[in-house]
Amino acid sequence: MTTADTQPAGGAPQLTVPQAIANLNQTEDKGDRYYAAWWLGRFRVKEPDAIAALLAALQDESDLAPDGGFPLRRNAARALGKVGDSAVVPALLDCLKCPDYYVREAAAQSLESLDAKAAVAPLLSLIADGVEAAVEVPGKPHLVQPYNAILEALGSLGDRQVIPAIDPFLSHAVPQVKNAAARAMYQLTGEGRYAQILVDTLSGNDLQLRRSALLDLGEVGYLPAGEAIAATLAENSIKLIALKGLLEKEIRATDDLVSDRACKVMTLMDSLL
């Protein structure tokens, strides 16, 4: 599971759509602009003026972080993934070329959310150097590419031709990358052995990895993981989210709210309430 959008700290001001757009379009207060981009995404504002303001923010160069990145661009890229307008896909594809790691990560996540099939080739190009090149950037707290977001997006976009490129990442030394590859491989192949890698993570020592694996299993709807999810040493709230994902997939697949498998998942959910 990759990083989610970040809500600005402190008391959140109440905005209207016109205020948020006006704040984003002005250049004086970087904090107001950052919050406005988050707000427009949070409330999935689809008005043309809002989308235009977010697209313009993808080109911003004034909000420069100490790490050399572009915080406003990051929030704008995340927000555009939530508005549900496929017209923003070309701009997000351009973001995959941005020197800011976190802009590329946000763009990959948003392209996944928009089910942008046109993103497959550009995303694939970011991992074309293979698992050997997936190393840390000196002096940075991350790898050279946002592999988690890229692999998860490729898995969700469903093009089986990317399987040979993803498979080597199952052996990556970073557990989060390995899990992202396992999630993608399960989505692309339907083979339970890949989802089992996520299930095995649920019994590991790292709480954050357990949380991420719970959410991944819920996202892909791997029903055999139900009991392991319920027994994981993690917050019940996260386990319930994961089980809800299993239940929703079962209902979509069978159109039957009272199938044996659906009832089993609901029983597990009841046990956590």
Image (tube, grey):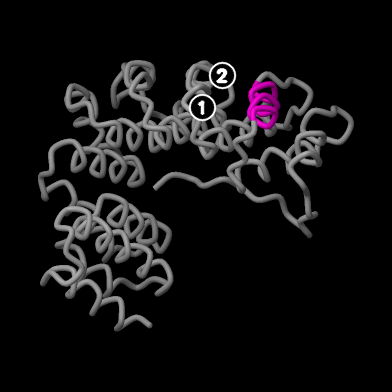
Q: How many neighbours does mark 1 have within 10 angstroms: few (below 14), some (14-19), or many (20 or more)?
A: many
Look at label 1 and name its amino acid: Arg
Q: Is residue 109 magenta?
A: no
In the displayed structure, 225 sits above or below 141; it is below
Q: Which residue is mark 1?
A: 104
Foreground residue, 264 or 21? Answer: 21
Say whether disc 2 or disc 1 marks the residue closer to the N-terminus: 2
Direction from residue 266 to residue 68 in the image, left or right: right
Foreground residue, 171 or 241? Answer: 241
Residue 253, position as x, y percentages in the image:
17, 53
Q: How many neighbours does mark 2 have within 10 angstroms: few (below 14), some (14-19), or many (20 or more)?
A: some
Q: Which mark is residue 98?
A: 2
Foreground residue, 100 or 186? Answer: 186
Residue 100, position as x, y percentages in the image:
59, 25
Residue 108, position as x, y percentages in the image:
44, 30
Residues at marks 2 and 1, CA–CA distance in whole angstroms: 6 Å
Residue 186, position as x, y percentages in the image:
18, 43
Range of residues picked out in magenta: 48-58
Determine the residue positioned at 32% across, 21% down: 120
User: Looking at the image, do the residues carrying marks 2 and 1 touch, with CB atoms under 8 Å apart?
Assistant: yes
Look at label 2 and name its amino acid: Cys
In the displayed structure, 205 sits above or below 29; it is below
